[in-house]
């Protein structure tokens, strides 16, 4: 882009590309339908309002609490275009957790949707700005409402090496940490996915994921806007609404977590035959459906294939690294596996001695490359401890078998050390879910003086099953499929599993349930 007076201005590639996409539809949401030009002018209005008299936010943090909608994208881009670090907060989180983010991120301002302002309480005395007012008035009022005079000033140059975003880790283990990524990191994450999954401007994706997490932000929204594609946003997840969008016949992509696919399947099973047919037929216009952020049970992959005709593409990633491993777009997608490294991502598995392991041996996943985050916010020791020789240690265990990676789980919660053996909770869960009485389950470690840890399982019974299967019988059944030391020896039944906002099972909460007196039945 040329500056008045002839000089070349540095503009973020994402923004420059949007300028070129002009009057194509960028976002359709509850607020209406918006073009790339609309996004450019709305985000410019936000940037100008945030800047006020300043020339550049200079990587100051701006936290924002805005539901998934056009306003969300306009605020996020406005922060970026003003030179700030965008800190999205989870709209499902209670005041206490929002207060933690405000405390830790130390922002200069908070932008909140008018409907959510109350949730912020005093907001530590920070200026709280209304997203609706910044974007230039709620639906209907178009944009460009800049404070007088400031429209004459150009927005700051923002180089990709600057810090762009701070996402708080899910906190399934320990207190959430701010994961800081630069614009270059986000661009590398997006470019890798755009190449691997062949995004084009003709794509149309449905977004039903929360926008405080890498999955919704990078894989869906930013990849779509980078590509000049069309993103339809549903503000919250409702099974029938998602199915109806799919049945509208013009989507090409859908990406979700396994819990969402489970809910869609459950709604499909309950629907009358003609609706089932319309929903299943709607899946035909899609060219790709992706699952990730938690292990996809093979039984779910198979049922989804029967219902939709799609073999879900499972991929593996993490807030700190974006996506790292993916099944192929073309070619065989192996159930239970997460494929190979994505373009531009180096992946290796290392043993406890930090050395690469042989194929077929379990090891910790380490990742290197431009997609890897820059730091944990104000936690230099934790940042340093998570890198070895330039590789980021993910804390996840995997094994490479016949050229594809299989995730064994997080070493802190999913790898159970019992009587000198190591057991992958994910492998045991996979087997248990094939039992007709079991709808879902979570396998955890319970401390034990004799074994070090015992393998324990919380079961959710299948619909219509009121009595849990006898522990002895279940153990005998499992021993036919798993080595004896992998078979759980403590059982409990729950109406549902505790999950976080992303739908991931919070295993420490399951462990706490087992820690309660008398909890967990030992069948022997
Ligand atoms: P988050 O940073 O919230 O995205 O969580 C990342 C974690 O989710 C990873 O470290 C893995 O433990 C887990 N995860 C992501 N994708 C998968 C997958 N396909 N299979 C199993 N676990 C996964």
Image (cartoon, rainbow, N blue to C red):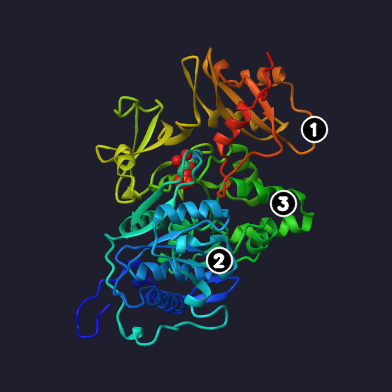
State the image coordinates of residue 49 (x, y, percent, origin top left): 40, 77
Residue at which label 2 appears: 117
Whether the residue under disc 3 has CB within 8 Å of ligand 1: no
- In which quarter of the view is residue 114 placed? bottom right
State the image coordinates of residue 276 (x, y, percent, origin top left): 73, 55
Classed neighbour count for the residue bearing mark 2: other residues with Cα under 10 Å, few (<14), some (14–19), many (≥20): some
The secondary structure type at the circle numbered 2 is helix
Q: Which mark is residue 372?
A: none
Judged by depth in the image, the label closer to the viewer, 2 or 1, is 2
Whether the residue under disc 1 has CB within 8 Å of ligand 1: no
- Kindly identify the residue that appears in the image at 52 percent across and 70 percent down: 70
| Residue 201 can be seen in this image | no
State the image coordinates of residue 385 (x, y, percent, origin top left): 31, 37
Image quadrant where one finds the N terminus? bottom left
Classed neighbour count for the residue bearing mark 3: other residues with Cα under 10 Å, few (<14), some (14–19), many (≥20): many
Residue at which label 1 appears: 466
Considering only order in the chain, which callout, 1 or 2, is on the residue closer to the N terminus?
2
| Number of numbered labels in the structure image | 3
In the image: residue 445, left or right of residue 371: right
Image quadrant where one finds the C terminus? top right
Residue at which label 3 appears: 268
Q: Is residue 476 above or below residue 307?
A: above
Considering only order in the chain, which callout, 3 or 1, is on the residue closer to the N terminus?
3
- Kindly identify the residue that appears in the image at 46 percent across and 50 percent down: 329
- Kindly identify the residue that appears in the image at 39 percent across and 25 percent down: 361
Judged by depth in the image, the label closer to the viewer, 2 or 3, is 2
Q: Is residue 124 above or below residue 27?
A: above
In the image: residue 349, left or right of residue 6: right
Are the residues tagged 2 and 3 within 8 Å (C-beta)?
no
Whether the residue under disc 2 has CB within 8 Å of ligand 1: no
State the image coordinates of residue 404 (x, y, percent, origin top left): 43, 36
């Amino acid at each position: 882009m040329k500056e008045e007076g002839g000089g070349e201005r540095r503009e973020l590639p994402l923004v420059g590309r949007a300028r070129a996409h002009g009057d194509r539809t960028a976002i359709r949401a509850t607020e209406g339908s918006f073009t790339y030009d609309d996004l450019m002018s709305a985000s410019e209005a936000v940037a100008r309002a945030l800047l006020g008299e300043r020339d550049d936010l200079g990587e100051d943090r701006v936290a924002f609490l805005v539901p998934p909608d056009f306003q969300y994208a306009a605020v996020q881009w406005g922060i970026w275009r003003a030179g700030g670090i965008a800190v999205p907060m989870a709209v499902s989180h209670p005041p206490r957790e929002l207060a933690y983010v405000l405390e830790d991120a130390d922002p200069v301002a908070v932008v909140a949707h008018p409907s959510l302002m109350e949730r912020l309480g005093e907001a530590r005395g920070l200026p709280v700005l209304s997203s609706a007012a910044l974007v230039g008035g709620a639906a209907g009022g178009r944009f460009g409402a800049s404070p007088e005079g400031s429209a004459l000033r150009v927005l700051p140059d923002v180089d990709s090496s600057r810090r762009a975003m701070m996402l708080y880790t899910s906190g399934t283990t320990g207190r959430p940490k701010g994961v800081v990524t630069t614009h270059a990191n986000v661009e590398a994450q997006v470019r890798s996915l755009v190449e691997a999954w062949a995004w084009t401007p003709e794509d149309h994706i449905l977004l039903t994921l929360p926008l405080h997490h890498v999955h919704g932000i990078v894989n869906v929204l930013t990849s779509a806007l980078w590509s000049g594609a069309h993103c339809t946003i549903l503000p919250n997840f409702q099974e029938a609404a998602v199915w109806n969008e799919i049945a509208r016949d013009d989507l090409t992509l859908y990406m979700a977590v396994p819990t969402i696919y489970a809910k869609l399947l459950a709604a499909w099973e309950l629907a009358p035959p003609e609706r089932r047919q319309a929903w299943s037929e709607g899946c035909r216009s899609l060219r790709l459906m992706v699952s990730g952020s938690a292990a996809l049970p093979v039984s779910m992959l198979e049922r989804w294939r029967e219902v939709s005709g799609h073999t879900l593409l499972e991929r593996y990633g993490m807030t700190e690294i974006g996506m790292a491993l993916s099944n192929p777009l073309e070619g065989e997608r192996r159930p239970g596996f997460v494929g190979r490294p994505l373009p531009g991502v180096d992946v290796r598995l290392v043993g406890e001695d930090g050395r690469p392991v042989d194929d077929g041996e379990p090891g910790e996943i380490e990742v290197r490359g431009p997609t890897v985050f820059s730091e944990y916010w104000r936690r230099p020791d934790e940042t340093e401890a998570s890198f070895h020789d330039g590789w980021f240690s993910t804390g996840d265990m995997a094994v490479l078998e016949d050229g594809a990676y299989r995730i064994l789980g997080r070493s802190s919660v999913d790898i159970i050390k019992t009587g000198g053996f190591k057991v992958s909770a994910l492998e045991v869960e996979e087997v248990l879910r094939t039992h007709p009485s079991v709808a879902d389950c979570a396998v955890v470690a319970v401390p034990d003086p004799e074994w070090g840890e015992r393998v324990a399982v919380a079961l959710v019974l299948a619909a219509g099953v009121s009595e849990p299967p006898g522990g002895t019988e279940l153990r005998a059944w499992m021993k036919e499929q798993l080595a004896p030391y992998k078979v759980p020896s403590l059982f409990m039944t729950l109406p549902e599993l505790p999950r976080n906002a992303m739908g991931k099972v919070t295993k420490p909460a399951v462990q706490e349930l087992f820690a309660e007196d008398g909890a967990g039945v030992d069948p022997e």
